[in-house]
Image (cartoon, rainbow, N blue to C red):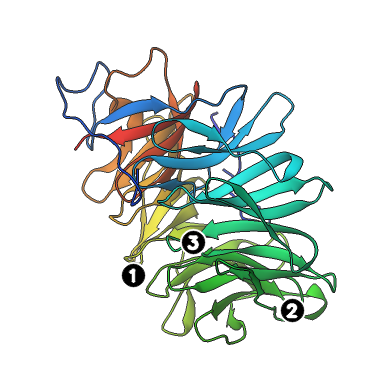
Amino acid sequence: MFTFSRAFASAAALAMTLTLSACGGGHHHGNPGGPGPGPISNGPTYDVIPIGLPGATYGEVTRRGIANGGVVAGTSRGADGTGHAFLYNGSKTIGLGTLGGDFSQALAVNACGHVTGWSATKAGTAHAFLYDGTMHDLGTLGGSDSEGTVITHCGQITGWAATAAGQTHAFLYDGRKLNDLGSLGGNSFGNGLNNLGVVVGYSFGPHNAWFHAFLVDSRTGGPLVDLGSPVGNSVAVDINDAGQVTGWFRNGEGAPTGAFLYELGKIRDIGTLGGASAEAFQINGAGLVIGASATADGSNRGFVYDGTTMTSIGSLPGGNVSIAEAINGSGLVVGSAATATEEHAVSWTRKDGIVDLNGRLYAPPAGLVLVRALAVADDGYIVVRTNQGLALLRPWK
């Protein structure tokens, strides 16, 4: 029986089975003759643009690794597994280099092609970086290492960094320096950041005995706000500009996970698709939450939650598993689903339902199979993993 090539999981290693732009524009062209041969389903039609990664055997892009205009940042890996950060600027792939060490990893990009992530230094430690044409070392909070996880349109960055006291704290980079956001007593980590400078993540309590989702508003300079949890521990993974927060919670090691939405000062369980577990991955500007949930029959489906109802994105013929990886501002969801024999990249909208993206390609390369959609921009560009490497899907206008 077909199973996904990886589990969907958060930083806490959950046990659910199955993780050009405002600065320039890309060229769009009309459809001269309709889609090429193959099964055609609903939804837009796409050109396929291979993202060349010289010397790479594998490429990685997070859901924050795409911006409008086909700007993509990610990590290429050679046969030895060593990672190197790259930027595809809409026309060519650029290696970002390192901070003097042997490896680097890009985790997020904005519409100007500015990238954050982490890189090895000459000393062999990992430091957060900002790439804006040059890779800049963002340093630490007095300790040895750091990592940038999110970058906004305005160039603010959050992540985590080691302190001189030996803890790890969430930070906000404001364009000049790392600002220590503190903690709830133990280590803390920044996972989400909106364009207003509000950071969310999770923090351990004293002695790292428990962890809760937090929110901190850099405009007020106040301390971390403990968002609590519907039950047990919790982690915030994303926040939109309206201040709505999503994430997951769990009551003890090995316990089922749940997905939550925090808004108007309250955190609440948003339920499941009938099974024991769910996990939220992202929230868009309209408050739509996406993630994955167990179903009553023990399989897993990607979901979209609209504030009141959790809706399954469904599955493809011959399969019973799907995952929603990312969502854009218009509600276009991308991810993957099982067929009877393999994994296929899919999209989902309320209008069209689940769509196998392999059936929406114009003149694709021979033998190409879109395996998983990894990220989607607000203008509809999609990054996909294929059996021939990473590729960009450019929608026809």
Q: Which residue shows up at 55% across the image and 71% down it?
A: 200
Name the spot of residue 42 as percent of width and height, x first: 22, 35
Mark 1 or mark 3, which is nearer the start of the sequence? 3
> Of residues 339 and 391, which is closer to you in this image?
391
Residue type marked 2? Gly
> Of residues 122 and 73, which is closer to you in this image?
122
Q: Quadrant of residue 162?
A: bottom right
Please, what secondary structure does the residue beneath circle 3 have? loop
Q: Quadrant of residue 32?
A: top left
Which quarter shows the C terminus?
Answer: top left
Residue type marked 1? Thr
Disc 3 vs disc 1: which is toward the camera? 3
Name the spot of residue 57 as percent of width and height, x first: 62, 24
Q: Residues within 10 Å of mark 2 (few under 14, many from 20)?
A: some
Disc 1 vs disc 2: which is toward the camera? 2
Image-based side of 246 in relation to 22, left or right: right
Which numbered tag is attached to residue 220? none
Q: Which residue shows up at 65% across the image and 76% down it?
A: 181
Name the spot of residue 107 as percent of width and height, x first: 57, 49
Mark 2 or mark 1, which is nearer the start of the sequence? 2
Calculate the distance from the C-alpha at mark 3 to the C-alpha at mark 2: 30 Å
Please, what secondary structure does the residue beneath circle 2 have? loop
Q: Which residue, given by chain and number where applicable, does mark 1 sit on? A: 308
Residue type marked 3? Gly
Which numbered tag is attached to residue 155? 3
Can residue 277 be spotted in the picture? no
Q: Which residue, given by chain and number where applicable, does mark 2 sit on? A: 205
Q: Which residue shows up at 46% across the image and 85% down it?
A: 265
Q: Which residue shows up at 21% across the image and 22% down it?
A: 35
Calculate the distance from the C-alpha at mark 1 to the C-alpha at mark 2: 32 Å
Disc 3 vs disc 2: which is toward the camera? 3
